Image (tube, grey):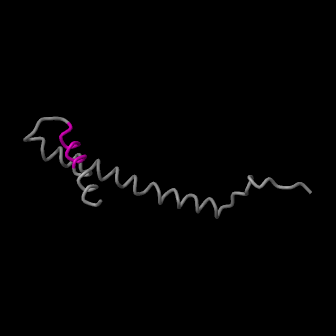
Amino acid sequence: MAERDPLQKRVTPKKLLRYFIQGVIILAPIGITAYVLYWLFNKIDGILEPYIHIPGVGFAIIIVFVILVGWVSS
């Protein structure tokens, strides 16, 4: 009888499901955050467009806002 290598563990459907759920739990907040920042960037640039014609002002405002939220939360 051949011994099994302990490093070669069997991947079962239950493990695959667990890995999938863990991946979703890790990636969902990242994806949601990226989408919200993209949405805010478009909204702020849309609001400022008639008044300020400098590209990237919305991005700068979002970066400053995120830094301020991080500062307040610490």
Q: What residue appears at the point 7 percent right and 41 percent down from the top-left corner?
A: 51
Residue furthest left in the image: 51
Counting from the top left corner in percent of width and height, residue 4 is at 82, 55
Q: Quadrant of residue 16?
A: bottom right
Q: Quadrant of the N terminus?
A: bottom right
Q: What residue appears at the point 30 percent right and 53 percent down from the top-left corner?
A: 36
Region in magenta: 56-64
Q: Nearer the viewer, residue 66 or 43?
A: 66
Q: Nearer the viewer, residue 60 or 51?
A: 60
Q: What residue appears at the point 22 percent right and 47 percent down from the top-left corner?
A: 64
Counting from the top left corner in percent of width and height, residue 40 is at 24, 50
Counting from the top left corner in percent of width and height, residue 10 is at 73, 57
Q: Magenta stretch: residue 62 in it?
A: yes
Q: Is residue 47 above or below residue 70?
A: above
Q: Is residue 24 above or below residue 62?
A: below
Counting from the top left corner in percent of width and height, residue 70 is at 28, 55
Q: Is residue 63 above or below residue 9?
A: above
